Image: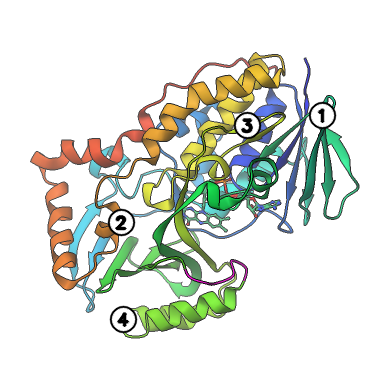
Amino acid sequence: MTDRKVLISGAGIAGPALAFWLRRHGFHPTVVERARGPRPGGQAVDVRGAARGVIERMGLTARVRAECVDERGMAYVAADGTVRARMSVHAFGGEGIVADLEIQRGDLARLLYEETRSDVEYLFDDSIATLTEVPGGVRVDFERAAPRTFDLVVGADGVHSRTREAAFGPESAYLRPMRAYLAYFTTPYPDDEGWFLLHNAPGGRVVGTRPDRRGRIAALFSFVSPPLDVDRRDAAAQRRILAERFADVGWRTPELLAAMADAPDFYFDLYGQVRMDRWSAGRVALLGDAAWCPSPLTGQGTSLSLVGAYVLAGELAAAGGDHRTAFARYEQVLRPHVLRCQQLPAGALSGFLPASRAAIWMRDRSMRAMTSRPLRRLATRAFFDKADGLTLPEYVPAR
Ligand SMILES: Cc1cc2nc3c(=O)[nH]c(=O)nc-3n(C[C@H](O)[C@H](O)[C@H](O)COP(=O)(O)OP(=O)(O)OC[C@H]3O[C@@H](n4cnc5c(N)ncnc54)[C@H](O)[C@@H]3O)c2cc1C
């Protein structure tokens, strides 16, 4: 077995999941994460289709279920709270807009870290500074730790991946912005509805609340906009943008905006998809959002990361650590599935963020129609069965 020392950049979902499977197959992974610990934040993310099989094979189904968010479904509401359209969690066999296996992103990241920390080396509060391919390995200079050489490096450092930048070139070549922004944060307000509620306002704006597992409400804001001149790390400027854009919106918007200043986990980003012709260059490979971010609109990001981690580790093991063979197989097995999951049905963005009152009314009507019997099969094909499109290969773990 060759190429066994693997550096993984990013301890989100994809990174620790890859570390889990690499350990099972007898590799020695190290994970470097910029944050000081597993990063909290994010709303409920869906575990769909083939990813359920991966969680099952990890032996984690019971733990994930125990930490699941108990959401009853999703509903669009008017400014006075009247429900305009709703979709229960049981619609579409538990694979609808709200899936029946939903866990908060921060909880899943922590759980995967806890499952791996006893036999995986984690370097928190650090980051790759430079990567240099040397004979038989990759020399890595870190921002804080001493330089080291690894057999392979995997970038699982999210949609703005620094590993991708270092090994493949600038983000602008791969990230396709989608003319809309998204923000999430936890509020101190209690939840007594159990529903994911969304209120649209004209101008392509939506405000939402979701129950979290601790009985509080997490807030979601999203709006249509061309790319804005705002620094990704300037949370104060991002908060100002939200406050201005949503100043005239009713429903619970004022109290949610008031909670934004003290939120411990404020998250703000542009919607976008990552498209790449190749996910590896020499001894460096990409995984998860770094390689193929499908955008949160698809609801597939977490599931694809879990499946991708399983396949990448499995192919490395099957090839005896030979990265050339393994990286080629990884792409062959996964790319068609990723491309399917990245496809957004026409009107997905304008359906989530309708521009006018009339468009909001139409969207509510089509959501009601979608759950009716005649249209349910059509909607399933357009939206909800993509995650099933891969039969997980069998890889025999060493332990
Ligand atoms: C805070 C946060 C909240 C999110 N909330 C949601 C949500 O509510 N709904 C949703 O659908 N998707 C959300 N996402 C995206 C979602 O997690 C991903 O689509 C999906 O789970 C794929 O996971 P990933 O591991 O590839 O990327 P991510 O989960 O984004 O993880 C990437 C990790 O890499 C780390 N990192 C970044 N740069 C560096 C660097 N230079 N060096 C070392 N480490 C680095 C990040 O801190 C992060 O821990 C969120 C992501 C983050 C980071």
Tell me if residue 74 is in the magenta stretch: no
Q: Which residue is mark 2?
A: 349
Task: Give the magenta-colored segment's residue range.
Answer: 228-233
Amino acid type of disc 4? Val
Task: Say few, some or many: other residues with alpha carbon within 10 Å of mark 2 (under 14 / 14 to 19 / 20 or more).
Answer: some
Relative to residue 255, is residue 399 drawn left or right? right
* Residue named by callout 1: 137
Q: Residues within 10 Å of mark 4 (few under 14, many from 20)?
A: some
Spatial CA distance of label 3 from label 2 is: 30 Å
Whether 29 is drawn above or below 247: the answer is above
Position of residue 319 relative to residue 194, above or below, is above
> Which residue appears at 32% of the width and 65% of the height?
193
Image location of residue 181, percent across then percent down = 43, 64
Helix, strand or loop under label 1: strand
The residue sitting at 47% across, 65% down in the picture is: 184
The image quadrant of residue 182 is bottom left
Distance of label 1 from label 2 (alpha carbons):
43 Å
Q: Secondary structure at mark 3?
A: strand
Q: Which residue is mark 3?
A: 280
In this view of the protein, which residue sits in the foreground, 314 or 321? 321
Q: Say which element carries label 2.
A: helix
Judging depth in this view, the residue of 212 and 280 nearest the camera is 280
